[in-house]
Image (cartoon, rainbow, N blue to C red):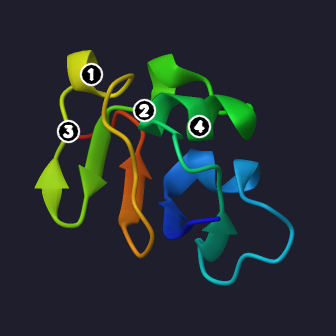
Amino acid sequence: MPQINLKLFANLSHFMPGDAVRNEVVYECDNDNSINSILQGLNVPLENCHLVIVNGVFIPAEQRDSHILADGDTLAVWPPVAGG
């Protein structure tokens, strides 16, 4: 089974598995897991996943159902951020 490096930031960090350290964990997933299927499996609300990066490359929302993660990939996700 592939293992990915999963990073969830800001208010998404409470969806991390219990063994996460500093918002990061090595996460074992199925061979055909898309970005959205991994996030849904962790109960992360997809509408809260604003910035999604795989191996340093932005993945737009319309590609997150079809983008399959491979062993060793790094998935990093941030919620929408507001400020001033």
Q: Amino acid at mark 4?
A: Leu
Looking at the picture, which amino acid does disc 2 mark?
A: Cys
Answer whether labels 1 and 2 touch (C-beta < 8 Å): yes
- Which label's residue is closer to the chain start, 1 or 2? 2
Disc 2 crowd, CA 10 A, few/some/many (<14, 14-19, 20+)? some
How far is mark 1 from mark 2, CA to CA? 9 Å
Q: Pointer 3: what residue?
A: 59
Could you tell me how far apart the alpha carbons at marks 4 and 2 are, in whole angstroms? Answer: 9 Å
Vertical relation: 58 (above or below) 44: below
Residue under label 4? 39
Residue 61 image label: 1
Query: Badge 1: few (under 14), some or many (20 or more) residues near its Cα, within 10 Å?
Result: some
Q: Residue furthest bottom?
A: 21
Q: Which x, y percent locates residue 18?
A: 86, 68
Identity of the residue drawn at 16% across and 65% down? 56
What residue is at 72 percent from the left and 35 percent from the top?
41
Q: Are marks 4 and 2 in contact (CB under 8 Å)?
A: yes
- Give the CA separation, mark 2 to mark 3: 11 Å
Residue 46 in sight here: yes
Q: Which mark is residue 49?
A: 2
Q: Is residue 42 left or right of residue 30?
A: right
CA distance separating discs 4 and 1 = 13 Å
Q: Are marks 2 and 3 in contact (CB under 8 Å)?
A: no
Tell me the quadrant of the picture where the N terminus can be found: bottom right
Q: Whole-percent x and y of residue 10?
A: 51, 54
